[in-house]
Image (cartoon, grey):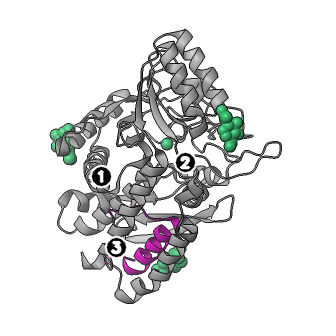
Amino acid sequence: MKFLGKPRSQTAAFLPLCWFFLKILQPGHSHLYNNRYAGDKVIRLIPKTEEEAYALKKIYHQLKVDLWQPSGISYVSEGTVTDVRVPQNGSQALLAFLQEANIQYKILIEDLQKALERGRSLQTQRNRRSLPEYNYEVYHSLEEIQNWMHHLNKTHSSLIHMFSIGKSYEGRSLFILKLGRKSRAYKGAVWIDCGIHAREWIGPAFCQWFVKEALQTYRSDPAMRKMLHHLYFYIMPVFNVDGYHFSWTNDRFWRKTRSRNSRFHCRGVDANRNWKVKWCNEGASMHPCDDTYCGPFPESEPEVKAVANFLRKHRKHIRAYLSFHAYAQMLLYPYSYKYATIPNFNCVESAAYKAVNALHSVYGVRYRYGPASRTLYVSSGSSMDWAYKNGIPYAFAFELRDTGHFGFLLPETLIKPTCTETMLAVKNITMHLLKKCP
Ligand SMILES: *[C@@H]1O[C@H](CO)[C@@H](O)[C@H](O)[C@H]1NC(C)=O
Ligand SMILES: *[C@@H]1O[C@H](CO)[C@@H](O)[C@H](O)[C@H]1NC(C)=O
Ligand SMILES: *[C@@H]1O[C@H](CO)[C@@H](O)[C@H](O)[C@H]1NC(C)=O
Ligand SMILES: [Zn+2]
């Protein structure tokens, strides 16, 4: 354990940083995020007919409803569960409409601002209690994650090498950890990214957890030792660095990047619709104000371009692409953009089946699994499809916990169980790679 903790002197140096963050987040000890979610509700709806779906789309548009899951208005259709955030001044109108039209709904979160503040006050207490050891059971800001990466790069140089693959739109470094026993011999690799979507905070928490587990167990766990001997892991804990930062400082439910648009005030592109694979077709939006905006052209986002360049350069070594999202509890594989079956379906499907069973064995949490198009929804321009089409034979996207009870506000007490079970799934997939698929 000790080797993953920070020396005391460094911890002391971090304290002013923590203070600085509290100040940004709670200007004048007032509300988080300027109280912008006061009275907002999160509501789950299931339109039963095409007419209901049509009426809902119209009213969502009028009331400026924020679609949480699925993430775009084009996905609203009969029989599809949608979780939406309704601004305070719209919730009365929406509830009245739902009652009149007799559409089933369930209020998931009564007052979003209150839910946020509850979470934050617990977090502050936990943070204080846990010093000076590094605490993997809290969400960390971008600065904290980057400091943690620098620290591991210094203290674990035999297993970890940290480097940057470029800069974000706002000029932040795009850091990667290369994890694995150094070897001159040829080694395959696994790519892991977290935090393509800013508000899905459990993603970066899992990436950190993965690295911690690898470092803590590779001496004692033969499976982990084998993984680090035979493979390199390229781990990008925060893909969408600008968006993640913004989700800490301004808008907890920000999803996209932060790039500007020449014609609209709305900022950001969906970094999981910006890849050159059936770009901007079904399940993506051409409108810059939408959460699934595909961008002005493929790889328009510097973050996407940097990762695509890296994967293109290393695709001969990379056997698996794993991307971590939330929330839905699903393990998805290609295709996202069409219903067709992938050529190596048998190998990929059996890896997914075993992985969700391994995950289930820990706490009994069930994940659905299958091709993204059939299991979640059709979406074009995704990183997973792109990786697969560019020659990476195993491409997966995880949608981590939960299924909507907390949604993006998954409490920190659930980081440990979520990461523990997910870890087993990832190890299972990795061990599958090391065998020849029958
Ligand atoms: C709710 O408030 C926002 C901004 O304060 C405004 O733009 C919007 O039109 C309002 N919506 C309704 C339904 O009154
Ligand atoms: C990681 O450490 C190596 C030396 O061990 C150094 O050359 C490299 O610049 C470090 N990476 C970063 C991003 O600072
Ligand atoms: C993967 O999970 C399956 C259960 O789904 C289990 O039987 C198998 O032993 C696991 N493999 C590894 C290497 O952990
Ligand atoms: Zn996502």
Earlier-in-chain disc, 2 versus 1? 2
Nearer-the-camera pick, 92 or 130: 92
Work out how far the residue at label 1 is from the one at label 3, CA to CA, in angstroms.
17 Å
Query: In the figure, 245 relative to 113: above or below?
Result: below
Q: Judge the density around disc 2: few (<14), some (14-19), many (≥20) Cα neighbours within 10 Å.
A: many
Quadrant where the C terminus is found in the figure: top left
Earlier-in-chain disc, 1 versus 3? 3
Residue 378, given in percent of the width and then of the height, sits at: 52, 26
Label 3 sits on residue: 134
- Quadrant for residue 208, please give it: bottom left
Whether residue 298 can be seen here: no
Whether residue 65 can be seen here: yes
Work out how far the residue at label 2 is from the one at label 1, CA to CA, in angstroms.
23 Å
Q: Judge the density around disc 3: few (<14), some (14-19), many (≥20) Cα neighbours within 10 Å.
A: some
| Residue at the outermost bottom position | 9
Tell me the element at label 2. Answer: loop
Quadrant where the N terminus is found in the figure: bottom left
- Quadrant for residue 229, please give it: bottom left
**Res 95 label:** none
Nearer-the-camera pick, 285 or 121: 121
Label 2 sits on residue: 37
Earlier-in-chain disc, 2 versus 3? 2
Label 1 sits on residue: 414
